[in-house]
Amino acid sequence: MDFGCVCIKKENMKKQILLFMAVVGSALITSAQYTPLVNEDNTWRGRSFGWVLQNYFETFDGDSIIEGVTYKKMWYQNVAATEAYQTALIREDVAAQQVFIYTGEPGSEEQLLYDFTLEAGDVVTVWGVGSPQTITITSVGTTTVGGTERKKFNFTDAMGAAYWIEGIGSMYGIKDAALGNVADYNPNVTCFYEGNDLAWSNPTNDTPCDLFLGVHEQEESFDMTIGPNPANDVLNIFCPSSLAGKNVDVRIFSGTGQLMLNKQVNLAARMQVDLPDMSEGLYLIIFSASGKTLAAEQFIKQGR
């Protein structure tokens, strides 16, 4: 494998990274405070198992007013997609420590999504997979999120043992507080970010959550050009010779988040990345230095 240099167009870098990562501003709390869930500074990464495996992000952005009530728009984006789409309207009563979802069906009313005041033994009906789900809270404990202790609510639904975490929501994602008897639908939150910081990762998760850190901490960027794209066995990368001699870390991730390459290189005017051991599909190549993301680009590996 012969490495030389990197170049990426600055305007493309943000676009390409956002296809694989979502990060936003930061939040500070203490363990004595209630931590709101509905926050535009938060990002959820998840994985859904069904007929196909999907890796996705969920975020809040923008408002919608329904009959005088303001809801936050919740957005979903597959990591391999170029656009996000709205999946729910959600509001939070911070004083009551409750979260509600508006289903949007004609004549429908908002439904309770979470109640973070519940105690062990309480029975509650919440929204999940498009209908009300009745669950019993079996125990309430705490877990560490972003260096602080948050309430963790354990319960059992049709899928088995499950939980909510204050400020994060359900282990299934924001809009499904519990699951009923469904087939080919098993979402799980894998990584949770507060601003630019990884605040929590699912203990059963094998996704490299650190992939999505530091995106807004870029100190410089490279004008990178790659080709061919799609690539076969070799990916060529070119950059100005003025960058020669800079040490950078190069990582390649598959569309499912698997780390395929992790290597430090000393840049020259050109580099080649050998791809013969990689299967066909979508990949992301990232260049970083001192923990800062400098450049990123998507490419497709195709067969001969």
Image: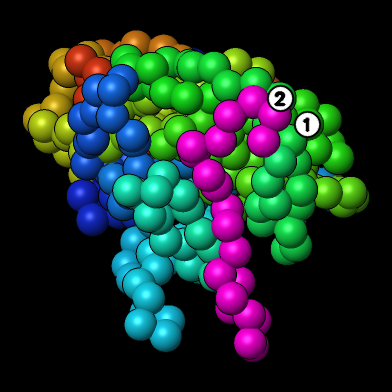
Q: Residue at 12% across / 35% down in the picture?
A: 220
Mark 2 touching mark 1, by CB under 8 A?
Answer: yes
Q: Height in image: 209 above or below 126?
A: above
Q: Nearer the observer, disc 2 or disc 1?
A: 2
Residue 55 is left or right of residue 62, and the answer is right
| Residue 255 locus on image (x, y percent) | 59, 39
Crowding at mark 1 (Cα within 10 Å: few <14, some 14-19, many 20+): some
Tag shown at residue 296: none
Crowding at mark 2 (Cα within 10 Å: few <14, some 14-19, many 20+): some
Residue 113 is covered by the magenta coloring: yes
Q: Residue at 33% across / 34% down in the picture?
A: 34
Tag shown at residue 138: 2
Residue 299 is left or right of residue 147, and the answer is right
Q: Amino acid at mark 1?
A: Thr
Which quadrant of the view contains residue 190? top right
Which quadrant of the view contains residue 2? top left
Which quadrant of the view contains residue 69? bottom left
On the question of residue 81 being in view, the answer is: no
* Residue that label 1 marks: 156
Please report the bounds of the magenta region as a residue range. Answer: 103-122
Q: Residue at 51% across / 31% down in the picture?
A: 165
| Residue 109 locus on image (x, y percent) | 59, 76
| Residue 259 locus on image (x, y percent) | 55, 22
* Label total for image: 2
| Separation (CA) of disc 2 from disc 1 | 8 Å
Q: Nearer the viewer, residue 26 or 77?
A: 26
Q: Nearer the viewer, residue 185 or 117?
A: 117
